[in-house]
Image (spheres, rainbow, N blue to C red):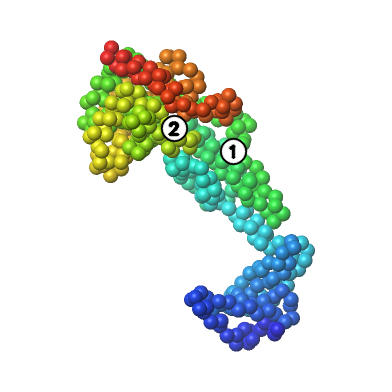
Amino acid sequence: MSKLTKSYIDRLPLPKVGANGKPCQSIYRDGTLPGFGLLVGSGGTKSFFVETRISGKVRRVSIGKYGHLTPVQARIKAQELLGSIVLGNDPAADKRAVTAKATTLGAAFEDYLLTRKDLKPGTVKNYRKCVDGCLSDWLQTRLIDITKDMVQKRHSDIGKKAPARANNTMRVLRAVFNHALAKYEDAKGKPVITINPVERISRTRAWYPIERRRTLIKPHELPAFFKATQELAYDVTRDYIHFLLFTGLRKSEGASLKWSDVSLEDRTFTIPDTKNREPHTLPLSDYLFDLLKSRKDEGSDCIWVFPSPMREGPLRDPKQAMAQVAEGMGKHVTFHDLRRTFITIAESLDIPAYALKQLLNHRNPNDVTAGYIVADVNRLRAPMNKISNFILEKSRS
């Protein structure tokens, strides 16, 4: 082995490309400094490295490219690294620690979204709306530079106009910091981020109190509701809105329904992708069976039960149609009001609690008894028909 000098390195031949066309590398080790070496690639790249045992394993640490560093500079850096390793340091861990400390909110947020594989597209969209809309000026700020005072002030500033959005934004920020607390470590394995500044909002009880919406369609308003929906120009939208009212489904669950998820023979339908990620099978009441059978006869060539006007996909959020219904009723109505109406009617009819939970696909991890109950769709037929009949009766009053 020769000493890695400029004249020696300049004379080194480039390795030939492999038979499979992949580039090859040759290794040259310094004859005077053990662990110091040079990698020569078939493309002409020459890189200095240090190779030694770290924490019981032989590891190779890159120093820099020849040309950016002279052999003398690389040798000095190699000696420093080797000396640091002898003292028990890990250069790779040190590098990770430096990178972790430099992590910005924007980078941590993207890392959080990439790690959380269970987040639904709609949830990711809402998270991005919070961060991009309320924390965009912090995206290039390092996490370690975001203080409790900054968080408290931003929460207060957002809350002056939009209290609910202020709370939601800070919940997203709290989740990102919790992710960083668990993942980003220094060379000794200790967390780089040691506090979650959003916790001050909890400790000071500064969260904005948000009253849960309780709007719904009351029984005496059902005739006006049905009259308004009958005036909609697109019958698919009308049927879709009725379907949501008679099932209590969320709007995205109803819109995504495919004919492959419907069994007219068994009089059931299944929502495969729900909020809690568990498939949700429900029986079709007599009214719903007639509605879907009519839809099937009209649109058997489409995979979607409620297709868009151009039939290229599912029905998109028909906000204008719901606005027209609201105008016809003389009352503000939202899609989620349909779900609340279904739930309220079910409760008023004394539907058993566990049956109601099955109808709504609610899961309570602390409810041990519910965990032993096997959902039987046939046992839900009577409650489903009871709710449907009540809605139909009141709609004719």
Judging depth in this view, the residue of 49 and 247 nearest the camera is: 247
Whether residue 112 is visible, yes or no, is yes
Q: Residue furthest right?
A: 87
What kind of element bears circle 1?
loop
Residue 55 pos. (x, y %):
74, 61
Relative to 236, residue 215 above or below: above
- Left/right placement of residue 35 relative to residue 294 reads right
Residue 66, image x, y percentages? 60, 77
Give the percent coordinates (x, y) of residue 223: 28, 17
Q: Which mark is residue 280?
A: 2
Kindly tell me whether residue 72 is visible in this rendering. Answer: no
Q: Disc 1 marks which residue?
A: 198
Could you tell me how far apart the alpha carbons at marks 1 and 2 are, in whole angstroms?
Answer: 36 Å
Residue type, numbered disc 2: His
Is disc 1 in contact with disc 2, using a CB cutoff of under 8 Å? Answer: no
Mark 2, secondary structure of its residue: strand
Q: For this view, does 53 lie left or right of residue 23?
A: right
